[in-house]
Image: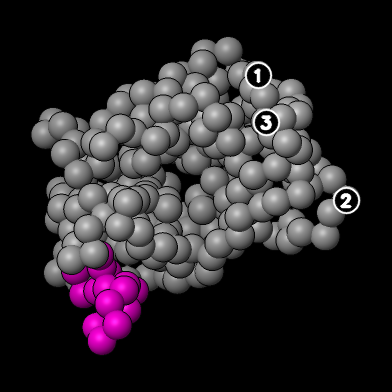
Amino acid sequence: MPNPYETPQLVSEYLFFHYATFKEAAGDLPVPESAWGFAQRVVSELLDPQSKPSTALDIGCAVGASSFELARTIPSVLGIDYSEAFIEAAETLKNDDYLAAEVPLEGRKTQPFVARVPTEIDRQRVRFETGNAIDLRSDLGNFDVVLAANLLCRLPAPVAFIERLAELVAPGGQLLLASPFSWLEAYTPPFLWLGGQQDGPSSTDVLKEKLSTHFRFEHEINLPFLIREHSRKFQYGISLGTRWRRL
């Protein structure tokens, strides 16, 4: 199946999702401001504020905002995404600090938008590369922090990804996960979903069972998010955010 995340339309949508201000996205419309800025909040609300990690891996980094957010406090960050177009956009932001896009306004009307990385972030702390989350290169090593935001329910084999996590997170390191568990057959065959079956356990329970061998559960929080489709239509979701400590 072709990768749906290679189109210019999706790149522009994710640039807006990751980098637009709430005012740019919603103006004066009565939408929840607390759900904006997901790529930044998934880091600030899940990362242990008492920790001082040196390395981080952001898997499914899309156009890079969460990777740059990790770089606020972490000296070396690697962002990986399956989409070459997303990684190209993230690289442009790293090198140039900005990237222009056109986002839908209404009908065929669009509006210009410029994505920018906050000036206080050292962009040179971040590297980007393409990669498949369920078949990551074998020489990645391990990291003090591994983040995967809104990724699990977009993978064709989420258990294969989960089984690699113990190798990717250094002992004592943090695993930060967020997912709305919005399972769809277009991405994951139903027999490979983590839960979500009529008479079976919840996705949360399956995830906790799968991780319990190598990780200790530490923190849980609801993380709402908004994706703007056009000036008066938004997708609203609530991811379950969890933090785990590698044993």
> Label 3 crowding class (10 Å Cα cut-off): few <14, some 14-19, many 20+?
many
Residue 88: quarter of image: top left
Q: Secondary structure at mark 2?
A: loop
Dot 2, crowdedness within 10 Å: few (<14), some or many (≥20)?
A: few
Circle on res. 240: none
Q: Residue at x 22, y 58 (%)?
A: 189
In the rendered view, does 115 fall on the left or right side of 95? right
Q: Position of residue 192 (x, y in %)?
A: 19, 62
Secondary structure beneath label 3 = strand
Q: In this figure, what is the number of numbered marks?
A: 3
- Is 73 on the left-hand or right-hand side of 194? right
| Residue with the most extreme front position | 107
> What span is colored magenta in the figure?
193-211
The crowding category of the residue bearing disc 1, from other C-alpha atoms within 10 Å (few below 14, some 14 to 19, many at least 20), is some
**Mark 3 in CB contact with mark 2 (< 8 angstroms):** no
Q: Amino acid at mark 1?
A: Ala
Whether 213 is drawn above or below 45: the answer is below
Residue drawn at (31%, 74%) of the image: 196
Can you see residue 51? Answer: no
The answer to whether residue 182 is above or below residue 24 is below
Mark sitting on residue 28: 2
| Residue position for label 3 | 103
Residue 208 in the image: state x and y as whole percent.
27, 73
Quadrant showing the N terminus: top left
Residue 209: say if magenta. Answer: yes
Q: Which mark is residue 100?
A: 1
Q: CA distance from mark 1 to mark 3?
A: 10 Å
Pinpoint residue 176: horizontal percent, then vertical percent.
Answer: 38, 56
Q: Is residue 45 left or right of residue 167?
A: right
Q: CA distance from mark 3 to mark 2?
A: 18 Å
Q: Amino acid at mark 3?
A: Val
